[in-house]
Image (cartoon, coloured by chain):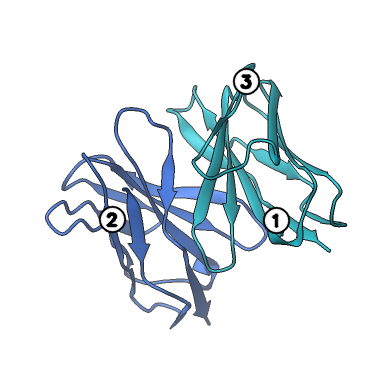
Amino acid sequence: GAVVSQHPSRVICKSGTSVKIECRSLDFQATTMFWYRQFPKQSLMLMATSNEGSKATYEQGVEKDKFLINHASLTLSTLTVTSAHPEDSSFYICSARHAHAGNTIYFGEGSWLTVV
Amino acid sequence: GNSVTQMEGPVTLSEEAFLTINCTYTATGYPSLFWYVQYPGEGLQLLLKATKADDKGSNKGFEATYRKETTSFHLEKGSVQVSDSAVYFCALETQGGSEKLVFGKGTKLTVNP
C-alpha cells in the first residue's frame, strides 16, 4: 500500500538552533500534505496544510515564522522548527492525501523532537 | 467548533474479549467519521470510516456505526487478539472537502494472551 515516510524519527537539538523534519510520499504524488503536533496523551493538532508549489496554510495560533513548511515537490514536504525552544519538544506527524486512491490520507511514522 | 471525545485509556483486555471504545463528536453540519489505528512504531492507518448517518464501517472484525441522534461512532470488536494491541484514534472530517481531520486523544489498547 501507499507509504509515507518521515525522517528523522528522533532528533535532539540545542535551544536556539533549527531542525528540519522531512515527510516523503514514497509511491505516490501528494499535492497536499498535512503537519500535526501531538503532546503526550493529547490529540493530534493540525498545524498546517502544505500545498505543492504554494505557501502553506497555517492553523490559528501556529507561528508561521517559527514552523517553516516547504512543499517543493509532489513527494516531499519539510517542516523546519526555527530557533527551537524546549517548549517545541513534541511528536510531529505528517500525512499525505492520495488523490488517486479515493483521497485516502496516509500518515508518516512521526518524529520525536527534543530540544535541550 | 468541531471536536472529538473518546474514552480515556489505557484499556487492557484478555484475548477473545469484547471491545468497545466510545467516541462522541461535536460538529457543524454532517461530518465523515473515522477510526485510525497506530501500531507500535508505525504511522496511523485508516481502520474504517462512515460518511453518513446509520452507515456502518467495518474492517478486520472492527465495526462502528454512525449515530447522528447520539453523535457517536463507537468502535467495537467481538473478539480481540493480541495483534490488536495499538492506539486507536477517532476522527472527523467536515463535509465540503475541508481536508481537515479533527482527532480524539487516542485510546491505547493492550490485549494479553
Q: Circle 3: is it few (<14), some (14-19), or many (20+) Cα within 10 Å?
A: many
Quarter the N terminus of chain A occupies: top right
Q: Amino acid at mark 2?
A: Tyr
The residue that appears at 37% across and 79% down in the rendered structure is: B17
* Marks 1,2: beta carbons within 8 A: no
User: Are the residues tagged 1 and 3 within 8 Å (C-beta)?
Assistant: no
Q: Which residue is mark 3?
A: A52
The percent position of residue B28, horizontal first and vertical second, equals 23, 42
Q: Is there any visible trace of residue A107 in the rendered image? A: yes
Label 1 to label 2, Cα distance in Å? 29 Å
Image coordinates of residue B60 in percent, x first then y, are 41, 55
* Residue that carries the numbered disc 1 in the rendered image: A88
Query: Could you give the CA–CA distance between mark 2 and mark 3, rounded to whole angstroms?
Result: 31 Å
Give whichever of A81, A5 is nearer the camera. A81
Q: Which chain is cyan?
A: A
Camera sees residue A76:
no
Residue at the outermost top position: A53
Q: Position of residue B72 (x, y in %)?
A: 23, 58
Q: Amino acid at mark 3?
A: Glu
Q: Are marks 2 and 3 on the same chain?
A: no
In this rendering, the label closer to the viewer, 1 or 3: 1
Q: Is residue A49 left or right of residue B69?
A: right
| Colour that chain B carries in the picture | blue
Question: Please, what secondary structure does the residue beneath circle 3 have?
Answer: loop
